Image (spheres, rainbow, N blue to C red):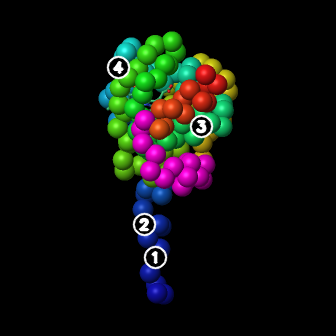
């Protein structure tokens, strides 16, 4: 209709900008801790293993699906065994999943290979092919991605 101001023009810039990965990470920090150091044997660190996984196609798929579908080990991460359950992180759209993974890859996980950011389109691709995968199915991708 003529004379109407488009809604986007009325919203503060933040409302239409990319999701804030740092803010989303606060929910991850409840388990993985604010620094991402984790709790040995219970909550794995988000560190060198994360960056190593993010450098490989199968690892990137694993990281995205861990957030979307959840994770149920057994897993071995940085030499320590984990047999926990990470619940699927509901309520995050593709751009939000990408944003939180990018926050981890740049601000939390500081060692390991160079980090290549995730895009919302990349996350959408993994999601579209995930079907009825469970957290246990996702956990199996960890060993595949690490070539073990
Ligand atoms: C309720 C606790 C909890 C929350 C909240 C949580 N996680 Fe986890 N996360 C876990 C547990 C437990 C594991 C290990 C699962 C296992 O033992 O199979 C894990 C594993 C992971 C892994 C696998 C690490 C690796 O090196 O293989 C990633 C990546 C991860 N979480 C990212 C996230 C992100 C990102 C968020 C926030 C969006 C998040 N987690 C929120 C508990 C949690």
Whether pointer 1 and pointer 3 mark residues with C-beta atoms closer than 8 Å, the reply is: no
Identified at 48% across, 58% down, the residue is 16
In the image, which is nearer the foreground, mark 1 or mark 3?
3
Picture quadrant of ligand 1: top left
Identified at 37% across, 15% down, the residue is 41
Q: CA distance from mark 1 to mark 3?
A: 41 Å
Q: Which of the two discs, 4 and 3, labels the residue nearer the N terminus?
A: 4
Q: Which residues are magenta?
A: 121-136
Along the viewing direction, whichever of 100 and 84 lies nearer the viewer:
84
Instruction: Please give the residue where the numbered disc 2 appears in the rendered image.
Output: 10
Residue 42 in view, yes or no = yes
Instruction: Please give the residue where the numbered disc 1 appears in the rendered image.
Output: 5
Return the residue found at the far left: 30
Q: Is residue 100 above or below residue 10?
A: above
Indicate yes or no: mark 4 CB to ligand 1 under 8 Å.
yes
Q: Quick one: label 4, few (<14), some, or many (20+) residues within 10 Å?
A: some
Q: Which of the two discs, 1 and 3, labels the residue nearer the N terminus?
A: 1
Q: CA distance from mark 2 to mark 4?
A: 45 Å
Q: Which of the two discs, 4 and 1, labels the residue nearer the N terminus?
A: 1
Q: Is residue 48 above or below residue 58?
A: above
Indicate yes or no: mark 3 CB to ligand 1 under 8 Å.
no
Residue 81, disc: none
């Amino acid at each position: 209709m003529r004379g109407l101001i488009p809604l986007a023009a009325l919203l503060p810039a933040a409302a239409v900008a990319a999701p804030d990965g740092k803010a989303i990470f606060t929910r991850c920090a409840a388990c993985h801790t604010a620094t991402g150091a984790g709790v040995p044997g219970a909550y794995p660190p988000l560190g060198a293993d994360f960056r190593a996984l993010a450098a490989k196609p199968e690892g990137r798929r694993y990281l995205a699906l861990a957030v979307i579908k959840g994770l149920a080990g057994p897993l071995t991460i940085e030499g320590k065994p984990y047999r926990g359950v990470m619940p699927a992180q509901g309520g995050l759209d593709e751009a939000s999943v990408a944003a939180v993974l990018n926050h981890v890859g740049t601000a939390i996980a500081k060692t390991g290979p160079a980090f290549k950011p995730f895009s919302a389109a990349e996350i959408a691709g993994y999601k579209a092919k995930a079907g009825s995968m469970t957290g246990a199915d996702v956990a199996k991708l960890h060993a595949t991605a690490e070539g073990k």
